[in-house]
Amino acid sequence: MITITFTLPKPFPLLNHSIGQSRFALTRMRRQMARSVASTAAHLRPAEPLQRAHVLIERYSAGTPDKDGLYGGAKFLVDALTTPRLLNVRTPGARQRVKNKRGLGFVVDDGPAHMQLEVRSVKCRRLEQRTVVTITEVVA
């Protein structure tokens, strides 16, 4: 069984932070999250993406967010953990498109068949704010 744990230096932004942002600002946020995960955990990436995994994300922050904002805010982080894949193109001669091009390949997909997601909020002092991600392989 494989277990991967890494810590991001800041808590991930909540859903309320991204509501009303332009698509350019959202793209910037996705890119920053993928870069943060890549710089922190690139050396921990498995050779093959995990087929089934339990992902625990702990957001340490000074405040306590509501549950829907907590899970919604974790989307960019979860997307950074999944694997990019080519989409089927139905038009002959058209360029192939990639779904989730910023995925780093820790887990195959974020669907329920591949990932069990658990997001927790932990109250702490302002100096101790961070995000801890634990990915554990689920053996069937």
Image: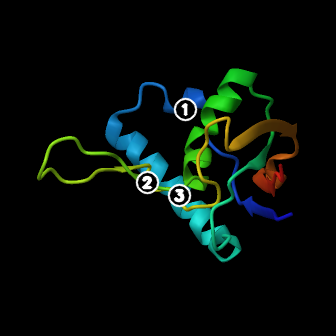
Residue at 19% x, 54% y: name it: 95
Name the amino acid, label 3. Answer: Ala
Dot 1 surroundings within 10 Å: few (below 14), some, or many (20 or more)? few
Q: Secondary structure at mark 2?
A: strand
Label 3 sits on residue: 34
- Residue 27 shows in this picture: yes
Image quarter for residue 14?
Answer: top right
Label 1 sits on residue: 17
Tell me whether the residue at label 1 lies in contact with that at label 2, contact meaning CB atoms closer than 8 angstroms: no
Task: Give how far apart the Cα atoms at labels 3 and 2 are.
Answer: 16 Å
Q: Position of residue 119 (x, y in %)?
A: 77, 37
Q: Position of residue 9 (x, y in %)?
A: 71, 60
Residue at 41% x, 55% y: name it: 101
- Closer to the chain start, of discs 1 and 2, is 1
Tell me whether the residue at label 3 lies in contact with that at label 2, contact meaning CB atoms closer than 8 angstroms: no
In screen coordinates, is 10 left or right of 33?
right
Task: Give how far apart the Cα atoms at labels 1 and 2 are.
Answer: 28 Å
- Residue 66 shows in this picture: no
Dot 2 surroundings within 10 Å: few (below 14), some, or many (20 or more)? some
Task: Give how far apart the Cα atoms at labels 1 and 3 are.
Answer: 17 Å
Which label sits in the foreground, 3 or 2? Answer: 2
- Closer to the chain start, of discs 3 and 2, is 3
Viewer-side residue, 115 vs 6:
115
Image quarter for residue 38?
Answer: bottom right
Viewer-side residue, 135 vs 16:
135
Label 2 sits on residue: 85
Q: Secondary structure at mark 1?
A: helix
Q: Position of residue 128 (x, y in %)?
A: 83, 54
Which label sits in the foreground, 1 or 3? Answer: 3
